Amino acid sequence: MNAPLKITKIGNSAGVILPKELLAHLNAAVGESLSVVVTPRGIELSAAETDFDAQMAAARDVMARRKRALKELAK
């Protein structure tokens, strides 16, 4: 799909309206969150992972408990 999207003013911000075909391709719906990643070619949109916050909390817990081991591995 290669369709131009118009930037619209929304209060003090700006936004774009995503066509339903694009939402279907992203497997996303109105009200859900999208993940945005900056790449060398532009930006990449994807449906946000529902358990991302839980995964990050687990990673932070491991990093806090294994701080010395991770520091040694980073050498």
Image (spheres, rainbow, N blue to C red):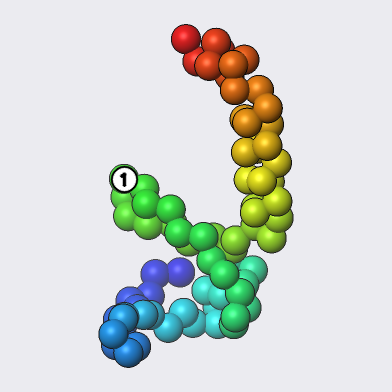
Q: Name the residue beneath numbered marker 1.
A: 40
Residue 24 coordinates in the image, percent (x, y): 61, 74
For label 1, the crowd category at 10 Å Cα-Cα, with few meaning under 14, some 14 to 19 and many 20 or more, is few
Residue at left offset 65%, top offset 54%: 53
| Horizontal arrangement in the rendering, residue 74 relative to residue 51 (left or right) | left
Displayed quadrant of residue 5 = bottom left
| Horizontal arrangement in the rendering, residue 31 relative to residue 16 (left or right) | right
Q: Classify the position of the N terminus by image quarter.
A: bottom left
Helix, strand or loop at label 1? It is: loop
Q: Nearer the viewer, residue 59 or 23?
A: 59
Displayed quadrant of residue 23 = bottom right
Q: How many marks?
A: 1
Amino acid residing under circle 1: Pro
The relative height of residue 65 versus residue 11 in the rendered view (above or below) is above
Residue 5 visible in the picture: yes
Residue at left offset 36%, top offset 80%: 15
Residue 34 coordinates in the image, percent (x, y): 53, 66
